[in-house]
Image (cartoon, helix red, strand yellow):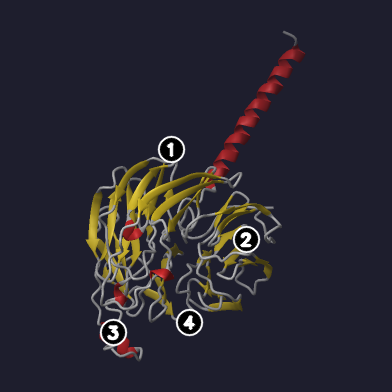
Amino acid sequence: MSSSSCGGQKTKLLFLISAVILCQLENSSLSNNQWNQFRGPKGDGTSTAKQLPKAFDEEVNVTWKTRISGTGWSSPVIWENDIWISSGDEASKELRVICVSFETGKITKNIKVFDMVPRPRDPAYKYDSPHLNSPATPTPVVEEDRLFISYGSQGIACIDRKSGATLWKRRDLRIYQPVRQGSSPIVDTDTLYVAFDGTDQQYFIALHKSTGDTKWKTNREIDTNWAKTLATKGFSPKGGGKPNDNKKSFATATIIEVAGKRQLIAPAAEATISYDPDTGKEIWRVMHPGGFNVAARPVFANGLVYIFTSGLTGYLMAIDPIGQGDITDTHLKWITTKSTPHIPSPIIINDALFLVTAKGGVARCLDANTGTELWVKRLGGDHWASPVYGDGKLYFSNKQGMVTVMSASRNNPRIIARNQMQGSFIASPALTGKSLILRSTTHLYRISK
């Protein structure tokens, strides 16, 4: 064999090796950008995505737009080429999960998971208002082989991601929530976790991912002086129509690791509780009387757990999670009730905490270590969707169809773009690769350059 032929083969071999390495790097990057649960891989709304679009509208930088049937406020979750969302139809009484191709926007699966069953109802609760929520608000969790989907009291199911076959179902977990379920499931290696906080029952449950069987179930009824809390806020304790309204909550839990041990941080109504995720045993709790209807997901950063409540009082609390028992008076690092989010979860980048109010769209940045306000801007609109962060930018989407893009800065940031869309955004967005995935009340969008 000639030296030139040998050299040519070596060149080809090096080219093939380089191609394989490049392919592996691209696949690794794709894997890192999976958006597998509510608020993304880390559960905090942040992404490593780059080259994200800044300016867009219904015609500019829209890769595709797909109409979604039924009603649902669950956020999109993404694995490889699959985007999954849940939906419910009050007319047909069907609860479905829908899979959309990331590349084409085509619906590849539309699976009926459950037929709706009559909701539990307390006749004494005069202001039953399921219309204030959707029949499919909890966000699914997607993995390589499985999809876990919760419709609250209507049922939980595990679905084979590739075939669409149902692997197991649970329909025995029933509570009365006058405004339906909001808590999304979360998972670890072996277990699925979800909160059930109604006006009649409040419990947290852990299920085996492979079978759906109960691993542990913990009663978490919070005993507070509700009459005193009402009186403090100027309300009459005799006012009726909403019995046990202070018992309900909608928050999604978060698993953290502190000092080498895992904790399951699970906001309830009027208290946030930390559990041992393996046993369900309570580790600590922080009380927040009057702070119920909790919707925001806790965030763990800078060694602190950040909790955000709604109800009569919107608390924003920074908690040192190293403690046991009732640590309300001992482990609170700072607390504020000024212009707190109530519904949308916040973003923490380094030591800057970015949040937006549900009403009026008042965006603020606080020092995450002290709670000191660094700046405030009025974005406008009603923000129920949680903001997301990627490529140095914050994306705020509101019910009026406006998506505001802002630089994530502790200093007075500039608004990069204000993008008006035709839809109403209640579901939180997803980020993956170079794309922003938006779910309006009627459509799913892929926004990319």
In terms of secondary structure, where does tag 4 sit?
Answer: loop
Q: Is residue 187 visible?
A: no
Q: Secondary structure at mark 2?
A: loop
Where is mark 2, residue-wise?
Answer: 392
What's the residue type where badge 2 is placed? Gly
- Furthest toward the right, the residue is 4
Separation (CA) of disc 3 from disc 2:
48 Å
The residue mark sitting in front, 1 or 2, is: 1
Mark 1 or mark 2, earlier in chain? 1
**Badge 1 vs badge 2, beta-carbon distance below 8 Å:** no
| Residue marked by disc 4 | 338
| Earlier sequence position, callout 3 versus callout 2 | 3
Residue 175 occupies which quadrant of the picture? bottom left
The residue lying at 43 percent from left, 57 percent from top is 88
Can residue 166 be seen?
yes
Disc 3 crowd, CA 10 A, few/some/many (<14, 14-19, 20+): few
Q: Which mark is residue 154?
A: none
Residue 15's x, y, as percent? 68, 27
- Residue picked out by circle 1: 163
C-alpha distance separating marks 4 and 1: 49 Å
For residue 240, the mark is 3
